[in-house]
Image: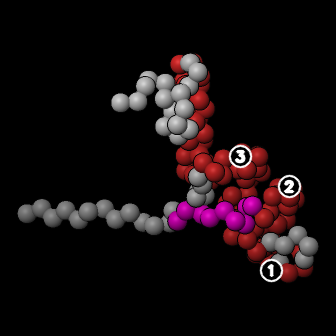
Amino acid sequence: MPPALYCVKTGEKYKSKDEMLSLRRENDNKKQKVRYWRKQYGYDLSLDDYDKFKEITHVIRYVYKHHDFLLKYDPEIPEKLNKEDLEIYVKNHKFFKKTIPHLKYIKSLKKINTNEKKLDPIVITF
């Protein structure tokens, strides 16, 4: 059985119990935020995405509904927008301008398929 202050991830001992608890607290906080972002915004995120996604949450909260538009959006060629996309752009242009520095990362994010309908079991009574 390993010692009480042994860290399995690093293979070393913690210096104190306070250090162990603070590192666990930080890790739990990150996991909770990733879980919240997955549920709230519908992106398939992992702990590796935590730092990058944290930088852009102030913008993502306004544009996550328009992820399909952002996949097609090219700020260098705005003439290629069709009528529906143009309406989306006009309504949210100030947020789309803020996404331009992070557009490559946003395009790499994958949406979770939340449109699957859950079927209720069929109950037959006699």
- Name the residue at 85% across, 81% down: 80
**Residue 26 visible to an observer of this rendering:** yes
Q: Residue under label 2, please give it.
A: 98
Q: Residue under label 1, please give it.
A: 82
Left or right, 75 with respect to 43, comes to right
Crowding at mark 2 (Cα within 10 Å: few <14, some 14-19, many 20+)? some
User: What secondary structure is marked by label 2?
Assistant: helix
Residue 51: mark = 3
Q: N-terminal of the two: label 3 or label 1?
A: 3
Left or right, 10 with respect to 3, comes to right
Which residues lie in the magenta part? 105-113
Crowding at mark 1 (Cα within 10 Å: few <14, some 14-19, many 20+)? few
> Dots 1 and 2: beta carbons under 8 Å?
no
Q: Amino acid at mark 2?
A: Lys
Left or right, 43 with respect to 55, comes to left
Residue 42 percent coordinates (x, y): 58, 57
In reply to whether residue 89 is colored magenta, the answer given is no
Distance from the alpha carbon under mark 1 to that under mark 2: 21 Å
Q: Amino acid at mark 3?
A: Asp
Locate the N terminus and report the quarter of the image it occupies.
top left
